[in-house]
Amino acid sequence: MDYKTEYQKWIDNKNLDGALRSELEGIDDIEMRERFACHLNFGTAGLRGILGAGINRMNIYVVRRATQGLAEYVKHAHGEEKGVAIAYDSRHMSKEFAAAAAQVLCANNVKTYLFSDMRPVPELSFTVRHLGCCAGVVITASHNPKIYNGYKVYGSDGGQMAPDAADVVTKAIERVDIFDRAKSMSLDEAQRCGMLEYICDEIDCAYLENVSSQAINRGIFDELTDFGVVYTPFHGTGIKLVPRIIEQMGMKNLIIVSEQSVPDGDFPTVKSPNPEDKEGFELAIRLAEKTNTDLIIGTDPDCDRVGIIVRSSGGEYVSLTGNQTGALLCDYILSASKERGTLPDNAVVVKTVVTTEMIRPIAAFYGARVDECLTGFKFIAEKIKDYETNNTGLYMFGFEESYGYLKGTYCRDKDAVVASMLICEMAAWYKKRGMTLYDAMQELYKKYGTFAEDVRNTYCEGVDGPAKIAAIIDNIRKNPPKEVGGISVTAVRDYQSGIITYRDGHTAPTNQIKNNMLYYELENGKGWFAIRPSGTEPKFKVYFGYCDKDADKAEAALSAIVQDVGRFTNN
């Protein structure tokens, strides 16, 4: 693609938005190439990119083009009457992009349901199922920095769009000229002719009813009237429903970080609105210290992921990783179900390939099965669909290491609303036993062994970033390590070829769809590491795990593996 020609096409367009035109005037050749050398890629996670002018940026024209492609997909599926639901978060331009998407869909005679205000992503997933829509759209960039926004597309099952469907939409988008081919009509006209319907509190109530049905120990907060939790929505959509569900469950002492409770796309109190980063919890920790609170919860701007801070036995506030929180939730859900006699014989827990292996001994202890899938909650959603369609299991819980959890099948994406509710309930349950969640985690380690884990990110930004990432991973694929950290590699899973190659030379299938990920199993089955490109950010991720009954040995082995792998990943 000739980036200079694309640039000139934008500059020559007399109707180009004035603010975007100002961005483009006087840019140098490097910046021109960054913005116009390629279109922002549409994949199973939809679109995500930096806000600004250009075909490799998030702007009103890119959103309209993508939505015209989606409209063609919906019409091909004869889904015009079923329609599309649209939600958005607190980011800059989210409301405007949501309106633009609605205008295009309505102009294509596709019934459109638009939330009247920002809402969590999982509620959109629920809404698609609840209203029987053909598809759904959420305008969000999750936990990315403030300069980003995105466009996530959901299928009729409420899960993120599957790869084959995303390919169909991509081909439809490619046929749309960025300025001339996207249809549009005003929202007022769309509402008058019945194509547009605004979604209000009725859907909130239905969604929260389904969330509350996932509670296990109802009434526990009546017994612990002094139990408190500090909550921060990081300036995002969580403020809409997380306090509401927790208060519905009877907890009287929810303390909200006021400075972070106001929706704001600048995220002024944090470097990044990411619940994985302890830095963002600084205000919450101060408030917890002041109020003598043991638990802090934070949800990302679109409220599909949740991070927690707990007080240790020494009184320090420490972060629990997504793996640790998931392990605690899994054990709590299975143990409570077994205690009540409601744990079915065909109970299933779902984890992604790079999620903690600790789930296996936990599930085995309670007689549940563990199923594994590729990274991305859409694959967990596909598992749920399979269980329901083929009666192959009863879904109990699913999660991924990146702080995403789901109990229940009312929606098909990770849900920080239900996770926040269950974390509060779980913390109260342990509180009755004189324990914090930190104590509970140590108890699990004593029972199942210490699972030491880590994840490292390497960013490769710019238009050449994807090629650099692909080259790094391909180099490792061609030159696989024989050992790392002094531990032999016993098997290599190449999810791109679909083949597992063992040390003795024999092979087996991965039994997963093709994906650019490598996974290395280490001697004695205690350790592993994996590498894959991120699906939402310009980086590749390396995941590590090692288990030992001795915590010091587990940490030492993990450290050696991380250091050694860093040699050939520049990590």
Image (cartoon, rainbow, N blue to C red):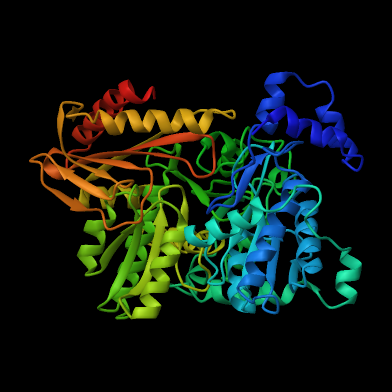
Q: Is residue 559 visible?
A: yes
List x then y, in percent, for residue 241: 65, 63
Q: Is residue 160 visible?
A: no
The residue at the far left in this view is 504
Q: Quadrant of residue 170?
A: bottom right
Residue at left offset 83%, top offset 20%: 26
Pick whichever, 181 or 213, lies toward us: 181
Q: Quadrant of the N terminus?
A: top right
| In the image, residue 106 above or below residue 537 | below
Q: Is residue 231 left or right of residue 431?
A: right
List x then y, in percent, for residue 420: 53, 59
Residue at left offset 88%, top offset 77%: 193
| In the image, residue 503 above or below residue 262 | above
* Count of residue discs: 0
Pick whichever, 522 or 168, lies toward us: 168
List x then y, in percent, for residue 522: 18, 38
List x then y, in percent, for residue 178: 75, 47
